[in-house]
Image (cartoon, rainbow, N blue to C red):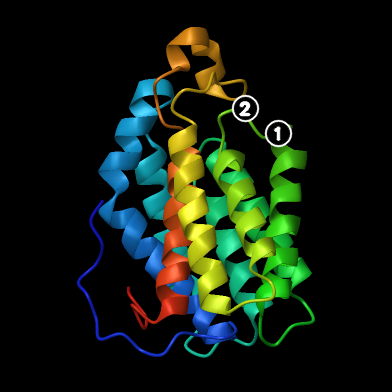
Amino acid sequence: MTTSTAQTPSAPLTTLAATDVAAWIRRACALVTEQADYLTALDAAIGDADHGANMKRGLTAAVEALEAEPDSPAAVLKQTAMALISKVGGAAGPLYGTFFLRMSTACAKHETIDTAALVDAVEAGIGGIVQRGNAEAGDKTMLDAWYPALEALRAGTDGAFAAAVNAAADAAAAGRDATEPMLAKKGRASYLGERSVGHIDPGAASTALIMRALADVVSGQTADAA
């Protein structure tokens, strides 16, 4: 996959402040916009062929809703959730919206997010996806990228923040790739039965992009991509 035009790297972050979370959403929008056709092609094989366009529209709306100086990480995450719920069609909107809304609630008391707080937030977000989508690991959904990311974050709690987040992004990408041989058990793809085998799940692919966006921001590879 391609990435946005490289910027001069800055020092890796040790926590996420509200402006850093906003930079994450902007970076996610940039990566999803670049890969919208790829996401749609994945969705065309086993879904409605609209995942790329939907995610691009939702994250663009989320970026437009961001304040110049956001109050808190939780506020940014809630704004993102509301934009995704209102602008992303299909199952992805409610699922991603719930994910970010649960993250927001988990971060409500944090002015900055460290690794432990990020673990709690991602775990809460995953819980929302499980509850709303009634899915589990191995069902060929975005959870197959989120769960490995969570485990990598948890394993990195005692180390450097940037290293933990980068490991989580790598784990999400591996989880994305691992969906290819899976049989879909949820969503429109499940209607295809054995024909769903051999295709990467588009939700897992967009999850991997979102986690890579976070790793880019935390590592200082991009200051505030739009």
Residue 40 sits in which quadrant?
A: top left
Q: Which numbered tag is attached to residue 139?
A: 2
Residue at left offset 36%, top offset 89%: 10
Secondary element at image label 2: loop
Total numbered badges shown on the rendered structure: 2
| 3D distance between C-alphas at marks 2 and 1 | 6 Å
Figure check: 72 above or below 121: below
Residue at left offset 43%, top offset 11%: 195
Residue 118 in view in this figure: yes
Mark 2: amino acid:
Asp
Residue at left offset 67%, top offset 62%: 155
Figure check: 9 above or below 201: below
* In-image side of 163 versus 40 (left or right): right
Q: Residues within 10 Å of mark 2 (few under 14, many from 20)?
A: some
Residue at left offset 66%, top offset 34%: 137
Which residue is nearer to you in this view: 185 or 75?
Answer: 185
Quadrant position of the C terminus in the picture: bottom left
Q: Which numbered tag is attached to residue 136?
A: 1
* In-image side of 145 versus 151 (left or right): left
Secondary element at image label 1: loop
Q: Residues within 10 Å of mark 1 (few under 14, many from 20)?
A: some
Residue 177 percent location from the top left of the image:
43, 37
Which residue is nearer to you in this view: 223 or 114?
Answer: 114
Residue 11 sits in which quadrant?
A: bottom left
Check the image and name the residue furthest to the left: 5
* In-image side of 99 versus 178 (left or right): right
Residue 102 percent location from the top left of the image:
73, 59
Residue 20 percent location from the top left of the image:
51, 82
* In-image side of 63 versus 103 (left or right): left
Mark 1: amino acid:
Glu
Label pair 2/1, CB-CB below 8 angstroms? yes
